[in-house]
Every structure is written in structure tokens, then in C-alpha cells.
Amino acid sequence: MDSSEQLRAEDNQSVVSRMQKNYWRTKQVFIKATGKKEDEHVVASDAELDAKLEVFHSIQETCNELVKIVEKYQLRLNVISEEENELGLFLKFQAERDSTQAGEMMDAAGKALCSSAKQRLALCTPLSRLKQEVATFSQRAISDTLVTINRMERARTEYRGALLWMKDASQELDPDTFKQMEKFRKVQNQVRNSKDSFDKLKKDVCQKVDLLGASRCNMLSHSLTTYQRTLLGFWEKTAQMMTQIQEACAGFHPYDFLALKRLQDTPGNLTADCTEGQTEGSCLTTDLNKVALSEEEEEERFEREPAVARALPRDSLEGDDFEKEFSFLNSLLSPTSSSASEFTQECQPACGSPCTGLTSQEPSVGPGSLTSSSQFLPSQLFDLGLHADGAFNTPNNGNQDMSAWFNLFADLGPLSNPDAIGHSDDELLNA
Amino acid sequence: MTYAYLFKYIIIGDTGVGKSCLLLQFTDKRFQPVHDLTIGVEFGARMVNIDGKQIKLQIWDTAGQESFRSITRSYYRGAAGALLVYDITRRETFNHLTSWLEDARQHSSSNMVIMLIGNKSDLESRRDVKREEGEAFAREHGLIFMETSAKTACNVEEAYINTAKEIYRKIQQGLFDVHNEANGIKIGPQQSITSSVGPCSPQQNVSDIGPDSGCC
């Protein structure tokens, strides 16, 4: 019966102890949860541990941020590479349609840009590895440390709860009172056990955080070395390509605008240039360029400055009329094949279509005199007049045209030799 | 066992200065180089003879770790004497004396006798605090001063007994109200018997426990 009572007493005591332990632990949890002021000395004794926890949280946060930043960086690398490649392709496409030095330059630059775009994508490989390693580090090393930290925090709560209990038991402590000492010894054991547990976990946490910091340094050092090497290689190659292009294009002549030269030229100068010994081909090429420039300039000016455009055709018309008058006079004075050839070349810059017609008819005619005769046919003269009139719509242009018409017939006075005219007709009939 | 008075002592100071070793050497006359950290408080007691009176010393050996600081403040109440201990080989323990002294003044009777103890005097080659510095600190703050070695037992008994003598002297001077337990002094059963019997009590012949000497 005594044994039974003793067992019952022990059970009660055990239950009471557990209740008291849970009570003080809950009180500590409550203090922590409500943010109440903790015992300053208890907090101070954990200063080193709390400093380690701050280091851990910093590592945790910065690793998460790093993964996000690397991801953004990769996306932007892809975008810039794509844009770079498109620009390169565009330049190459335009280069195929341009046979000038500018085309060569565009082709080289286009190829360099496409190559650069491809090499830039190579940066994604070490970046992917970096991101993967940091992510793995977070999932394993940081998570494992966090597990230990959580266990430590539970032990800390237990220990601080036990300290609260001991503080309460110390209020009316008397070593000569057995009951009080019994209670105190119970609390003391609880404190000792929870302190041992907490101290061990505290040590584990401090060691793990130190190890975590060191291993992160090692990981980043290794990954970033690879990335750095790849990046420097890419920069070096790109710089080298651009330097080569610059050197290759060093001799290229900058683009000149020759439009103004057209306005300064006069028919006299033009004739002088041709007669100064230049080859016919060279002269023709120059004339064609001038025509092209003149047309471009007229278009540009007509679009941008209508007032200026209005004045230009008049100048051009005057030039044309003068040339035609001069050429006809030349033909009359010296009707030779050489003269006809010069007339054709001179006429082309002014009005291409009629000159082409004359050129095509020349072989079929044969004799020089016959050619001269055909030029004086009324129908041809009438065509020239219509063409000139069609080119320019203004009344002033019409007036000038009439004047030219009268001038042409003025040369054929009634006093001229009718026999010459008849002779030409006979030759035509013979042909 | 009967005694005339019970004096409550409290031993305070940084962790690791040798508080528990001082207690063990005094109560059991032995030295234990490695032992567990004190949790909260440990207790010891011993009889000493002061001027023919039997005095029971009830000694509270407190935990020096910072996390127990608030708990140990409860133990100052009712202490007649305090042993304020530092380690002569660790200057920071000497530097922290001001803080411990402040706690003692704040949580105990103003008449509490405080003995400043510079422990580990056997480690002369590693001394970090001069004896003169300890003496100056004690003089400046009105404390008794001794250097001890719990290991060699040098001055250990003297420290406890000199503190008790000072307390007894204050009782004689009327500075301690022996009927107020808050002062840390309780009248023992012998005192009552003595009063009832008179000055011719035969227990006056109890043998004196003399301190060992020759350590210095």
C-alpha cells in the first residue's frame, strides 16, 4: 500500500513538473511573440550567436537576390544578342545592293556584328552554371543550416523559459528548508539540461554559419572566374574584329556630294572638257553621273523647297535650248559624221530619249549627208518641239520654244539655193 | 550542532575566476581543477570560531555567467558578507569588478562586508593584474583585500575568517541588528541557551579550529 502511494506521488510530481516546465516555456514563447523586453543579460550573453544569425540571414537573402539578378541578366543578354544579329543581317543585306566602298564597309561591319552576337550568347553558359550552383547552394547548404538554426531557436526558448522558472524559484530560497531546496534542485536540473542542449546547438550554428560563409566565397570565386574568363575573351575578340575593320577601311574615301558642281558647269566648259582629249567613255560616264546628281538634286529640292525648284527648270531649259541651237548650227556649217557623233553625245545629257532615237536611226541612214537631211525633216523638228513643250508646262517655256522655232526657219531664207534642197531629195529617192 | 550566529555569505564575480573552487577548498579542503559550470547557485556551510563564538557560515556560490545575472541578484538579499572575486591572470575580470560591486551595493544591505579576492595567486608567471592595483581598488571602495590561491589553499581560510571577524566586529558595534534577518545574521540555538543559562555555560570550552598557515 505504501509502495502504491509512493508510485502515485511520483507520478503526480512528474506531471506537476511537466506542467511547470511547459508553463514557463509558454511564458517565454509569449514574451518572444509579443516583443516584450527580454532580460538584458540573457540577451547580451547570446550576442555572438545573434551576430552569426545576422550573417546567415544576409547570406540567405543575397543568394536569393543573386539568382534573380543572374536570370534577368541572361534575358537581357539574349535580347541584345538578337538585336545585334538583326542589325548585322540588315547591314549585310544592304551591302549586297551597294557596290561602293560603303557597301564593303557595311558588309564587314555586318559580319562582325553577327559574329559578336553569337559569341555574346556564349556568356550564358557560365551564367547558367553560376545560377545553378547558387540555387543548389540555397536549396542544400542554406536550408540545412536553417534546420539547425530552427532547432537551436527551440532550445533557446526552452532554456530561457527554464531561466524564468529559476528566477521565480530564487525569490524565497532558503538552503535550510528541504522543500524549497527540493523545488530548486528540480529547476536547476531543468536549467542544466536545457542549457547543455542549447549550448551544443549554439556551437553547431556558429560553426555552420562560418562554414557556410567560407563555402559561399569558394563557390562564387570558382564560378565567377569562369564567367570572367569568358567575358574577357568575348571582349577581346570583338575589339580585335572592330580594329581589323577599321584598319581595312582606313583608305576608303569619304562620301562626297557633287551636286553643286553641276550648276557651275557651262556648255562651253563641257565642250572644252570633251575636246581636251578625254576618251569618249570617260566623258560619257562623267555626264551620266552629272545627270544622276542633277536629277537627285531636283527631286530633293522640289520636295523640300518648292520655290527654289520653280527657278531651276527655267535655267535648265535655257541651257537645253542653247545647246540645241548650237548643235544645229554646227551641223549646218560642217555636215560630217564626226559632227553628228558629237551632236549625239552632247544631246544625251539634256534629253536622253530623243538622242537615243537619233542614235538608233544613224546606222540605217549610212551617208553623212543623208543623216543631215533626215535631221531637217519637218516631222522630226516638230517632235523635238513637242517634247520640249511637254517637258515644261509654264507659258514662259512655250514662248521660248516659239522663238527657237522661228530661229530655226530663219536660216532657210528665200534667197538660199533651191538646187541644194532638190539635190537632197534626189539622193533620198536613190536610196 | 549549535552555533551563536549564522552568517550568510555570497560569492560573486565573473565566470571562471574560481568561485566554486574557493568554496570547495574552504568546506572540503580539496581542489578540483575541472568541474561543471555553476547553474544558478550552489551551497556550502562550515563552522568557524570567532573570539570564542561558534559561527556557522552559510555560503552561496553564485553562477558568474551573464545569462544568470538577473537570477543571482535575488541571492544578495540577506547576505552579511560578500566575496568579490577576480582572476589575477585575466584583466577583464578585474575590469568587471565595478559592475559586480554596483550590483552588490544595489541589492544588499548597506552594512554588508565585502572582501575583494584576487584568486589564482599561484600563477605568478601569468599575472595580469598587480597586487597593488587590487589593494588600491579595495582601498578606494572601502573593501577588505586578499590575494588567494584555491589550488594551494593559500589565504583561503583567512579570507573567509577575516570577513567573519569584520562582521562580528560590526555586531559588537551595534551596526547589525541581529534580530533582523534581512541583515543575513541569524541567532543560533546556542545563543538562546546561553542567554537562559548565563555566563557559566560549559560549552565555552569547544575546541578552536585554527587556520593552516605557511601558504604564503
Image (cartoon, coloured by chain):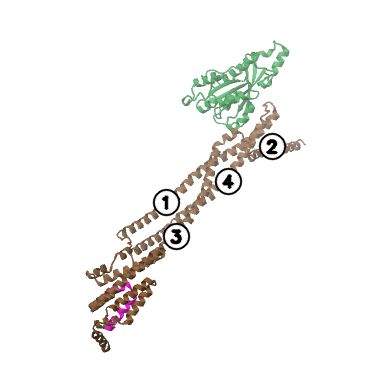
Chain colours: A brown, B green
Query: Which mark, residue A20?
Result: 2
Q: Is mark 1 in CB contact (under 8 Å) with mark 4?
A: no
What kind of element bears circle 4? helix
Q: Residue furthest front?
A: A415
First of labels 2, 1 by sequence position: 2
Q: Residues within 10 Å of mark 3 (few under 14, many from 20)?
A: some
Pointer 1 residue: A228
Q: Residue at x 51, y 47 (%)?
A: A62
Report whether mark 4 lies on the same chain as mark 2.
yes
Q: Main secondary structure of the magenta part?
A: helix
Pointer 4 residue: A147
Q: Amino acid at mark 1?
A: Gln
Report whether mark 2 lies on the same chain as mark 3.
yes
The N terminus of chain B sits in image quarter = top right
A363 in magenta: yes
First of labels 4, 2 by sequence position: 2
What kind of element bears circle 1? helix
Q: Amino acid at mark 3?
A: Glu
Pointer 3 residue: A83
First of labels 1, 4 by sequence position: 4
Q: Residue at x 27, y 73 (%)?
A: A326
B19 in magenta: no
| In-image side of A73 versus A336 (left or right) | right
Residue B5 image-quadrant placement = top right
Q: Which residues are magenta?
A: A346-365
Q: Residue at x 34, y 59 (%)?
A: A245
What kind of element bears circle 3? helix
Q: Amino acid at mark 2?
A: Gln
